Image (tube, helix red, strand yellow):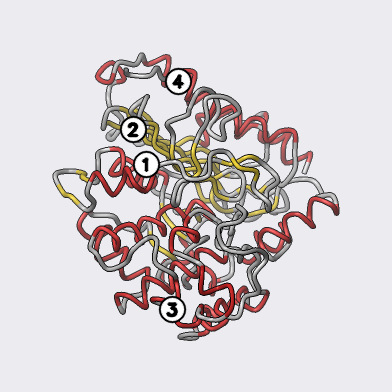
């Protein structure tokens, strides 16, 4: 990995940068200076120089206008173990990436949309819609428990991650109905990394007859004019998705045990699985939205504008307020071992020691496998998408990624 990092460090950033200058506004139009925007971009360049991220793409909207929509690096051919003879494919703002767990927030909004339509009630038990959850303590799990990681089924059954099962009708629903409980519903908070998303997908299908992929397409993506940004990708577009690559040092055994407890697989396995065509064409509501940084920013921009974008309304403002309201009050997450502020579907920021860095107590969004993020910050009037395909695991150089978020929060002033 060291030689690859050295190569990155002597690159001229402009040689591997792609800018959608047509979409970027004049920073002065949104009360910023060109230098402030460049400071944010320089933090992305420094992150790329770490050698941990073959490609990074970022899109930020401020006051409804795009201030930065850029990519750096290569989606293909730039991994640490790639031969110099492998063709390099330059990353652009239109490059497709997997959002991993950042997909959960989008999945959760499908439930909130159903609630808005009166087709589901957040405090009703799951078994009202999914009879498989009628036995024993499972009958007490409510929709709200599921959305705030308190359902008591955080560990995903190993056979649920058999990618062939993603393409067998009814199989995931049966598997999740049999999933063992770790605690009584509502008693503890523990990140449901994969399991919660699977159940959300089954809820949407049981209530509407549509897969969660079809539901998102029909009620959000088509009206808002998205190209991708759905669960999985059509077979003929699989090659467009940036392959995820492990770029870090070996992960200590104790850390791998924690990862396996959370994800059901090791970190390296999670990276490898995400490149499998069965994963890319299947439906994993917790882990496989495929889209661009611009689309990530655009979805959060819709939430930031109260459910309306480009004069098209897809959600009511009250639905978004309900979805983003704090539910867990920084309780220690039993799976992550960290104090987490959850709403019904989002990871919330804090005034100090925030996931989103800086004073970001009003932020709602979601991380994806450490270094993917989408979020909205109402105080700064920004919507942000940062995607990449380097998966470093544990590395001190990961500080460069968090510094992007820190630079954003410290550079863009609050509007109030």
In the rendered view, would you say 344 is above or below 31?
below
Q: Which residue is mark 4?
A: 38
Name the element at disc 3: loop
Work out whether residue 279 or residue 212 is closer to the camera in this orientation and state it. Answer: 212
In the rendered view, would you say 372 is above or below 64?
below
Q: CA distance from mark 1 to mark 4?
A: 19 Å
Q: Which residue is mark 2?
A: 61
Q: Position of residue 96 (x, y in %)?
A: 45, 54
Nearer-N-terminus badge (1/4): 4
Name the element at disc 2: strand
Q: CA distance from mark 4 to mark 3?
A: 50 Å
Q: Are marks 2 and 1 in contact (CB under 8 Å)?
A: yes
In the rendered view, does 216 fall on the left or right side of 393? Answer: left
Nearer-N-terminus badge (1/3): 3
* Quarter of the image where the C terminus is located: top left
Q: Are marks 1 and 4 in contact (CB under 8 Å)?
A: no
In the rendered view, does 332 fall on the left or right side of 344? Answer: right
Q: Which residue is mark 3?
A: 130
Q: Residues within 10 Å of mark 1 (few under 14, many from 20)?
A: many
Q: Which residue is mark 1?
A: 297
Q: Residues within 10 Å of mark 4 (few under 14, many from 20)?
A: few
Q: CA distance from mark 2 to mark 1?
A: 7 Å
Nearer-N-terminus badge (4/3): 4
Nearer-N-terminus badge (2/3): 2
Q: Are marks 1 and 3 in contact (CB under 8 Å)?
A: no
Residue occupying the point 55% across, 28% down? 357
């Amino acid at each position: 990995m060291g030689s690859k990092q050295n190569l990155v460090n002597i690159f001229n950033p402009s040689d591997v940068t792609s800018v959608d200058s047509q979409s970027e506004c004049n920073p002065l139009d949104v009360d910023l200076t060109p230098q402030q925007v460049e400071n944010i971009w320089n933090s992305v360049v420094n992150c790329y120089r770490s050698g941990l991220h073959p490609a990074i793409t970022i899109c930020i909207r401020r006051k409804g206008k795009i201030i930065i929509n850029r990519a750096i690096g290569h989606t293909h051919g730039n991994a640490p173990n790639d031969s110099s003879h492998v063709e390099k494919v330059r990353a652009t703002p239109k490059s497709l990436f997997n959002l991993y767990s950042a997909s959960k927030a989008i999945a959760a909004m499908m439930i909130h949309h159903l609630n808005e339509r009166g087709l589901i009630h957040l405090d009703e038990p799951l078994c009202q819609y999914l009879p498989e959850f009628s036995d024993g303590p499972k009958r007490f799990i409510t929709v709200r428990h599921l959305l705030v990681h308190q359902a008591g089924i955080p560990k995903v059954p190993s056979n649920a991650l058999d990618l062939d099962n993603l393409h067998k009708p009814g199989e995931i629903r049966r598997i999740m109905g049999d999933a063992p409980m770790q605690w009584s519903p509502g008693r503890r908070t523990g990140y449901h990394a994969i399991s919660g998303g699977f159940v959300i997908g089954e809820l949407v299908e049981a209530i509407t007859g549509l897969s969660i992929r079809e539901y998102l397409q029909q009620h959000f993506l088509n009206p808002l004019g998205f190209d991708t940004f759905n669960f999985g990708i059509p077979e003929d577009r699989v090659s467009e998705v940036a392959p995820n690559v492990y770029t870090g040092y070996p992960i200590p055994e104790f850390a791998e045990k924690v990862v396996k407890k959370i994800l059901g697989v090791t970190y390296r396995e999670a990276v490898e699985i995400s490149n499998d065509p069965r994963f890319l064409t299947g439906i994993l509501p917790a882990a496989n939205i495929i889209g661009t940084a611009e689309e990530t920013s655009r979805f959060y921009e819709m939430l930031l504008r109260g459910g309306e974008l480009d004069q098209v309304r897809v959600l009511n403002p009250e639905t978004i307020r309900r979805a983003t309201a704090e539910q867990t009050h920084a309780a220690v997450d039993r799976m992550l071992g960290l104090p987490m502020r959850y709403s019904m579907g989002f990871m919330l920021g804090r005034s100090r020691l925030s996931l989103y860095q800086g004073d970001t107590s009003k932020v709602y969004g979601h991380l994806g496998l450490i270094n993917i993020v989408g979020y909205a910050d109402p105080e700064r009037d920004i919507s942000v998408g940062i995607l990449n395909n380097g998966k470093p695991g544990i590395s001190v150089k990961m500080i460069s990624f968090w510094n992007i978020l820190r630079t954003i929060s410290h550079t863009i002033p609050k509007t109030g």
